[in-house]
């Protein structure tokens, strides 16, 4: 007998439990693992095995082995989807590995199709990180604009004001940023004033003074 996580009282008193959403092949892999301790992961079966194992045997070594399998295969093309998958199934080790990969490789991941499909909340959590490796804040600004191709102007403007650390930008970068936010055609949006005010401040104070005044921190590669 193997353990099933989060079962209801009725399930616990039955001789058998119906495993909805678990196909026969996946269940057979898990049963074989329970008896032999061996499993053969493939790109085709890994997700279904991890989902099923998370419910059937949530504390098992199977999840750890599956996480290591996925960690070894994280790429710029799948890192976002893999992290979201890991968070959905509470796979802490896998989530942390994906997060580290994303923060260190944003220059490459921002050019992928999956990047443009991220939610604003998810992207905000990534771009707000102090550990983010970025050549400059302008690179992050441009990344948000690229992401914005698949999102509304309001979403883009809202995100820019929340994640871009304007005190880390040169005057020329701020001038280009003001022009870019103005081009959205919503002059009354608070983000427009935010970047205009940042540009005015940059003309009055050097970068280090602006950083002290705003409390914004340097990122890993700023």
Image (cartoon, helix red, strand yellow):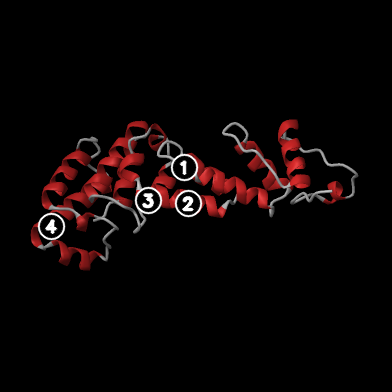
3D distance between C-alphas at marks 4 and 3: 28 Å
SS class, disc 2: helix
Tag 1 near tag 4, CB within 8 Å: no
- From the image, state whether disc 4 or disc 3 is nearer to you: 3
Residue pictured at 11% horizontal, 48% vertical: 172
Q: Which of marks 3 and 1 is in front?
A: 1
Confirm or deny contact between disc 3 and disc 2 (CB under 8 A). Answer: no
Which quadrant: the C terminus?
bottom left
Q: What element carries label 1?
A: loop
| Marks 2 and 1 close (CB-CB < 8 Å) | yes
Which class describes the residues within 10 Å of circle 4: few (<14), some (14-19), or many (20+)? many
Q: Mark 4 points at which residue?
A: 202
The residue to which callout 2 is attached is: 97
Residue sitting at x 12%, y 55%: 200
Seen from the viewer's position, the closer of residues 164 and 109 is: 109
Instruction: State the image quarter where residue 157 is shown.
Output: top left
Q: Which of 101 and 206 is in front in this view?
A: 101
Q: Which of the two discs, 1 and 4, labels the residue nearer the N terminus?
A: 1
- Provide residue 208's location: percent of width, then percent of height: 16, 65
Q: Which of marks 4 and 3 is nearer the N terminus?
A: 3
- The answer to which of 175 and 35 lies nearer the viewer is 35
Kindly report which numbered mark, 3 or 2, lies closer to the viewer in this rendering: 2
Q: Is residue 25 above or below residue 200?
A: above
Instruction: Tell me the CA gap for discs 3 and 2.
Output: 10 Å
Residue 74 is tagged as 1
Residue on which the image places disc 3: 103
Left or right of residue 24: residue 90: left
């Amino acid at each position: 007998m193997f353990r099933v996580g989060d079962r209801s009282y009725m399930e616990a008193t039955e001789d058998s439990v119906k495993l909805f959403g678990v196909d026969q092949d996946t269940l057979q892999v898990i049963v074989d693992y329970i008896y032999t301790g061996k499993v053969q992961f493939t790109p085709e079966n890994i997700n279904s095995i991890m989902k099923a194992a998370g419910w059937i045997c949530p504390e098992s070594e199977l999840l750890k082995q599956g996480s290591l399998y996925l960690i070894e295969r994280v790429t710029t093309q799948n890192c976002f989807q893999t992290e979201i998958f890991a968070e959905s199934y509470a796979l802490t080790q896998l989530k942390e590995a994906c997060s580290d990969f994303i923060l260190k490789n944003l220059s490459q991941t921002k050019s992928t199709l999956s990047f443009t499909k991220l939610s604003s909340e998810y992207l905000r959590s990534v771009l707000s990180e102090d550990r983010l490796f970025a050549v400059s804040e302008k690179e992050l600004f441009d990344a948000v604009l690229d992401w914005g191709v698949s999102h509304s102007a309001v979403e883009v403007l809202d995100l820019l004001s929340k994640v871009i650390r304007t005190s880390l930008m040169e005057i020329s970068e701020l001038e280009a940023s003001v022009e870019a936010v103005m081009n959205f055609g919503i002059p009354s949006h608070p983000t427009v004033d935010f970047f205009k005010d940042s540009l005015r401040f940059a003309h009055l104070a050097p970068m280090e003074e602006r950083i002290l005044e705003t409390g914004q921190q340097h990122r890993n590669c700023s």
